[in-house]
Image (cartoon, rainbow, N blue to C red):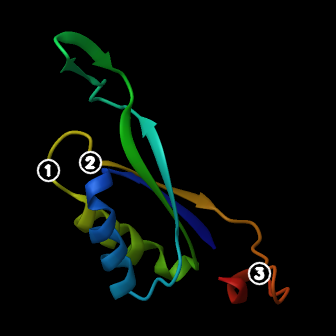
Amino acid sequence: MKMIAAVIKPFKLDDVREALSEIGIQGMTVTETMGFGRQKGHTELYRGAEYVVDFLPKIKVEVAVNDDKVDDVIDAISKSANTGKIGDGKIFVLNLEQVVRIRTGETGGEAL
């Protein structure tokens, strides 16, 4: 099992959700977050004063999947979150040791 965590632009969330639904992914966790990479923030003007925005709003999508779905999920997220511009985000794939469904006590792949 793997945990796939993707950091994407906020306006791409609906596209990513739809793409994951189309390949049969039934659940995900979404977190509003802040960060920067190569973008390194930007300067904004507010009421005549200029200020630097170091951290940009992002969305973190987490999906736990069986090993056979990893490539499909990565492909779906990559295609649906892509704008071709800097700051599109990153996808991280982590090993998932154990999963337990609290309600039923199911473990492993059955709990996904």
**Disc ID at residue 69:** none
Judging by the rendered image, the residue that carries numbered circle 3 is: 101
Q: Residues within 10 Å of mark 2 (few under 14, many from 20)?
A: some
Marks 1 and 2, how far apart at CA: 7 Å
User: Going by the picture, which residue comes out furthest to the right?
Assistant: 105
Q: Is residue 33 above or below residue 50?
A: below
| Amino acid marked by disc 2 | Asp
* Foreground of the two, 111 or 43: 43
> Tags 1 and 2 in contact by the CB under 8 Å rule?
yes
Residue 57 at x, y percent in the picture: 37, 40
Q: Tell me the quarter of the image containing the N terminus.
A: bottom right
Please name the residue shown 21% across and 57% down the image.
82
Marks 2 and 3, how far apart at CA: 32 Å
| Amino acid marked by disc 1 | Gly
**Disc ID at residue 84:** 1
Quarter where residue 99 is shown: bottom right
Q: Earlier in the sequence, mark 2 or mark 3?
A: 2
Q: Residues within 10 Å of mark 3 (few under 14, many from 20)?
A: few
**Disc ID at residue 88:** 2
Q: Residues within 10 Å of mark 1 (few under 14, many from 20)?
A: few
In the image, taking residue 18 as reference, residue 43 lies left or right, namely left
> Tags 2 and 3 in contact by the CB under 8 Å rule?
no
Could you tell me which secondary element the residue under label 3 belongs to? Answer: loop
Q: Earlier in the sequence, mark 1 or mark 3?
A: 1
Residue 20 at x, y percent in the picture: 38, 78
Please name the residue shown 31% across and 77% down the image.
19
> Tags 1 and 3 in contact by the CB under 8 Å rule?
no
Q: Tell me the quarter of the image containing the C terminus.
A: bottom right
| Amino acid marked by disc 3 | Arg
Quarter where residue 43 is shown: top left
* Foreground of the two, 85 or 44: 44
